[in-house]
Image: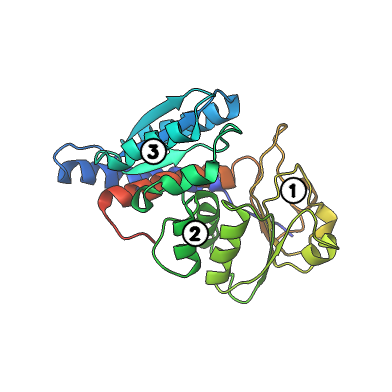
Amino acid sequence: MTAQVLDGKQLAAAEEDRLRSRVAALIQRDGGRVPVLATILVGDDPASATYVRMKGNACERIGMRSRKVLLAADTSTAQLLAAIDRLNADPDVHGILLQHPVPAQIDERACFDRIALDKDVDGVTTAGFGRMAMGLPAYGSATPAGIMRLLSHYEVSLAGKLAVVVGRSPILGRPMSMMLLSADATVVVCHSRTVDLPALVMQADLVVGAVGRPEFIRGEWIKDGAVVVDAGYHPGGVGDIEIGAVQHRAAAYTPVPGGVGPMTINTLIWQTVQAAEGRPRA
């Protein structure tokens, strides 16, 4: 079997071409006003700084602006909330990204939920999650929303299929399960403490690795002909799934890197452009 590669890098590049045209039209419509994504980075974590830089570069490539808000590692919850309030009130800012994770002294959930719903282009608020889960307009959490766009582009059939999501985080596993359910898949949500996890994964037509542990999901757990989506990325260029063991048995799979990651960033930018256009949330 020759598995189809779900190439997120290629799709993201093609989408950037379309976004570039939309941004140019926006700038013309708004008399030169350029769409802005505000990124908030608290502390000096190197990985987080890299992710913020990548998102800023993606903005620049399509003609948007990235406003970087850098806060010290000892920033308090109150100080971070105040910074978010300023961005919420700024009409020149169309989207707000608070880079995860924040230092331990900060109430991350309170800060996520302070982001105005119409600027929650990363899909991290509880209000946005609730609306999405109920089928109401909301910006989806960027990684699962990016996965759904990738599956749609490659015409991966989901209706009636058994999807097993391994991971239950509030910004990945849980919204992923809701999006798949809305696409008429039958969804099982598992995690690291699930009893007899291999047996459940073996039944899946679609496996989504979102557990945050390198190659936690073994190749032998996955049946021939399954679609394999790996949302993890760890040092050494490995994901949450032992992808090398299924590349020649799967119907389709996302490479690591180059699969889910580029679509996460592209979806964040795509949703910011939507916000700037004043379109209803998807």
Q: Which marked residue is nearer to the observer: mark 3 or mark 1? A: 3
Identified by mark 3, the residue type is: Ile
Left or right: residue 79 versus residue 159 is: left
Residue 232 visible in the snapshot? yes
Label 1 neighbour load within 10 Å: few <14, some 14-19, many 20+: many
Identified by mark 2, the residue type is: Phe
Quadrant containing the N terminus in the rendered view: bottom right
Q: Residue at x 54, y 64 (%)?
A: 179
Q: Where residue 110 appears, x then y in whole percent?
A: 49, 45
Q: Which residue is mark 1?
A: 243
Of the numbered discs 1 and 2, the one sitting upstream in the chain is 2
SS at badge 3: helix
Q: Where residue 129 appears, x then y in whole percent?
A: 49, 59
Of the numbered discs 2 and 3, the one sitting upstream in the chain is 3
Comparing 88 with 256, the one in front is 88
Tell me the quarter of the picture where residue 258 sits: top right
C-alpha gap between disc 2 and disc 3 = 19 Å
Identified by mark 1, the residue type is: Ile
Q: Which marked residue is nearer to the observer: mark 1 or mark 2? A: 2
* Location of residue 204 with respect to 214 vertically, above or below: below
C-alpha gap between disc 3 and disc 1 = 39 Å
Label 3 neighbour load within 10 Å: few <14, some 14-19, many 20+: many
Q: Residue at x 50, y 29 (%)?
A: 42
Q: Where residue 200 appears, x then y in whole percent?
A: 79, 66
Q: Where residue 94 appears, x then y in whole percent?
A: 31, 43
Q: Which residue is mark 2?
A: 129
Of the numbered discs 3 and 1, the one sitting upstream in the chain is 3
Tell me the tag on residue 84: 3
Left or right: residue 274 versus residue 203 is: left
SS at badge 2: helix
